[in-house]
Image: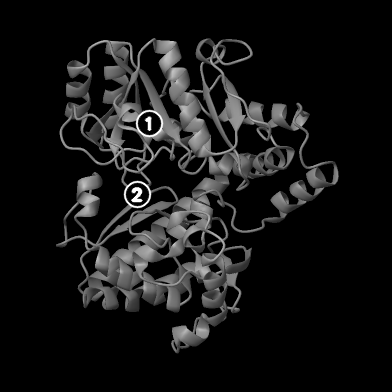
Amino acid sequence: MPANSSDAVAAPATRYAKSAAAHARARALMPGGVSSPVRAFKAVDRTPVTVASGRGATVTDIDGNDYIDYVGSYGPLILGHAPEAVTAALAKAASQGTSFGMPTEAENRLAQKVIDAVPGIELVRFVNSGTEAAMSAIRLARAASGRDKIIKCVGCYHGHTDSLLVAAGSGATTLGVPSSPGVPASVTQNTVLVPYNDVDAVRAAIAAHPGEIAAVAVEPIAGNMGCIPPEPGYLQTLRDLCDETGTLLLFDEVMTGFRVGLGGAQGLYGVTPDLTCLGKIVGGGLPCAAYGASEAVMRQVAPDGPVYQAGTLSGNPLAMAAGGAVLDALAADDGAVYRDLEAAAAGLASGLEAAAESVGCPVYITRVGSMLGVFFVNKQGERVTDYAGATACHIDRYTAFFGAMLDGGVMLAPSAYETWFVSTAHDEQAIRRTLEVAQGAFAAAAKV
């Protein structure tokens, strides 16, 4: 339980003094003082805290403040911070060498676990990040189909590879425009944007570009505009449309893979894609990702085929050991881990709804398994099903909510467009304390 969980909270200027000084030093060394933009806390108008350690459901900053953590390294820490099974596997692997650039049996073991668990994967290739997995899968989809264009959903994030880093567009057949300087328009001209959860838009986009769409790429559960589940029938209709038109269906399960079930979202919803991207949990929280498909598709990847992709650190033995330990834990006891996660996350979601309602703060809360989204909607009963709905919410209320939660000892992602992640380490005490802090945080948000 966080040491600072009393009702009296130290003044932020004093409480976060070491973090503030560390960030000031970091700004002189790195753009924004961070290695990834959201960590700068700019979206929530705060100075970022600097983490010293994590254990179980708690992270501790360099000022000695403890926080119940729902960031979980943005998803991979499904067993919490520093679980014994993972740290032991890492210690053993590290004692035998940290990197070889050569095959290891650990790759075989983890590959077999992935293939056994994920319905759409018969062969797998390990890479180093979700961005790399998506980039490689798109290249493979284009080669396998002989087509160039990709359909992606507005608000779905597939890493920062140039062709997928496009701004939100309007209309089913709008061609993407670069959303970052340094990305030429020519690179994104083959990216077609559609709204998430809109099958008619996908149907229109395919019709507008007959015989040109290589793949429909989608997060089966959107996790980068808050947590937005697929509407009933959405994923199956995408599957049917792709089958009808010779288009490949790509599920980006970097976030959902092994998180919402051992078989990922495709196992949960019973819809099998042609290509799958995995990340986060597959490496146990270490830099690791993967992409996979049927044997017929994957045999086109070098050295079996002409589609080139390589990486010196791919299949790193530390990541393979960590990922294997996590997947073993998730597969144990006939899915007991997922039943416990479901119960904990359901209790958290219902408690958050009750806390918000009690202080008159309209929210829409989504949940799939141990993934949650909290949207500060305009009125009670309003639903959020896509990026437009997410961006219409009260971001200023989230900012107030985030600050109150942080000062109360609960760490959330410093962006309204991220997902909450529950781990097996979030016990009843942690959930109860979270809801106690949330009551006041919703009250603060309601005043904005």
Q: Which residue lies furthest to the right in this view?
A: 96
Q: Is residue 269 left or right of residue 198?
A: right
Dots 1, 2 in contact, CB < 8 A? no
- Quadrant location of residue 348? bottom left
Q: In which quarter of the image is the N terminus?
A: bottom right
Q: In this view, does 299 lie to the left or right of 433?
A: right
The CA span between labels 1 and 2 is 24 Å
Residue hosting label 1: 163
Residue 262 appears in view:
no
Q: In the figure, 55 relative to 3: above or below?
A: above
Determine the residue positioned at 52% across, 34% down.
132
Q: Position of residue 142 (x, y in %)?
A: 41, 17
**Nearest the eye: 88 or 159:** 159
Give the numbered dot on residue 13: none
Q: In the figure, 28 relative to 254: above or below?
A: below
> Please, what secondary structure does the residue beneath circle 1 have?
helix
Give the numbered dot on residue 227: 2
Q: Where is residue 204 in the image (x, y as percent from the top left)?
A: 17, 22
Q: In the figure, 284 relative to 209: above or below?
A: below
Q: Given this view, does label 1 or label 2 mark the residue nearer the observer?
A: 1
Determine the residue positioned at 76% across, 27% down.
102
For badge 2, the amino acid type reads Cys
Determine the residue positioned at 32% across, 29% down.
188
